[in-house]
Image (tube, rainbow, N blue to C red):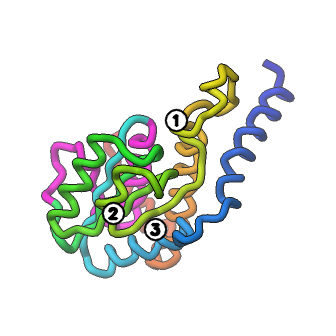
Amino acid sequence: MASEEMEKLSSQICNQISSVFSNPTNPHPPPLDLLVTELAGVSRRSSRVFLHGVGREGLMLKAFAMRLFHLGLSSHIVSDMTTPPISSSDLLIASAGPGGFSTVDAICSVGKSSGARVLLLTAQPERGSCVKHATAVCYVPAQTMASDEAEEKGERRLLPMGSVYEGALFVLFEMVVYKLGEVLGESPESVRSRHTNLE
């Protein structure tokens, strides 16, 4: 593949993902502001943040959990064997791009019944089954499997199924890490010092 074609495809993909952040989120707050505020609160309370998602959404949340740990937060992936119990001072961040998954619904329900704050990331805030468990909704207005009309028509998209939403999560989380690092006063040296040496 020629470098010109790679440059063209990469630009198209990046533009498609970045365009998500020009979409309005009313009546929901801007995703960046909401996540930074919630996570700064976790740090201020010396509480913990738990993250959960399935499939590729889950991979984005795992990458985010790693960076939150590097910023000094007590960060845990729900499915890990060393994950502690959630409590009322903690925050659960869960993703359900299409609005709901049975496993995400169940985890959010447990988080809510334990008194924790539940922040739901979704592209379908109005009709999803997970929203009823959320104390805060982080609306990411991107295409998901539930809204990929091109696939239903047999058309081939550059970013199929939930790829736009998943890519938007990665970019959103990088923005959050940058802004949260400022809010927490974390230096590049302190962030790097928390990176594992077991590689």
Element type where label 2 sits in the image: loop
| Quadrant in which the N terminus is drawn | top right
In front of the other: 198 or 185: 185
| Quadrant in which the C terminus is drawn | top left
The image's mark for residue 35 is 3
Q: Residue at x 44, y 42 (%)?
A: 57
Q: Which residue is mark 2?
A: 134
Q: Earlier in the sequence, mark 3 or mark 2?
A: 3
Q: CA distance from mark 3 to mark 2?
A: 14 Å
Compared with 88, 151 (above or below) is above
Image location of residue 183, percent across then percent down: 48, 79
Element type where label 1 sits in the image: helix
Q: Earlier in the sequence, mark 1 or mark 2?
A: 2
Q: CA distance from mark 1 to mark 3?
A: 24 Å
Residue 79 inside the magenta-drawn segment: yes
Compared with 184, 1 (above or below) is above
In front of the other: 169 or 138: 138
Image location of residue 8, percent across then percent down: 82, 34
Q: Earlier in the sequence, mark 1 or mark 3?
A: 3
Q: Nearer the viewer, mark 1 or mark 3?
A: 1
Q: Farthest residue toward the front? A: 127
Horizontal arrangement in the rendering, residue 102 relative to residue 6 (left or right):
left
Element type where label 3 sits in the image: helix
User: Which stretch appears magenta?
Assistant: 56-85
Compared with 25, 81 (above or below) is above
Q: CA distance from mark 1 to mark 2?
A: 21 Å
Residue 98 inside the magenta-drawn segment: no
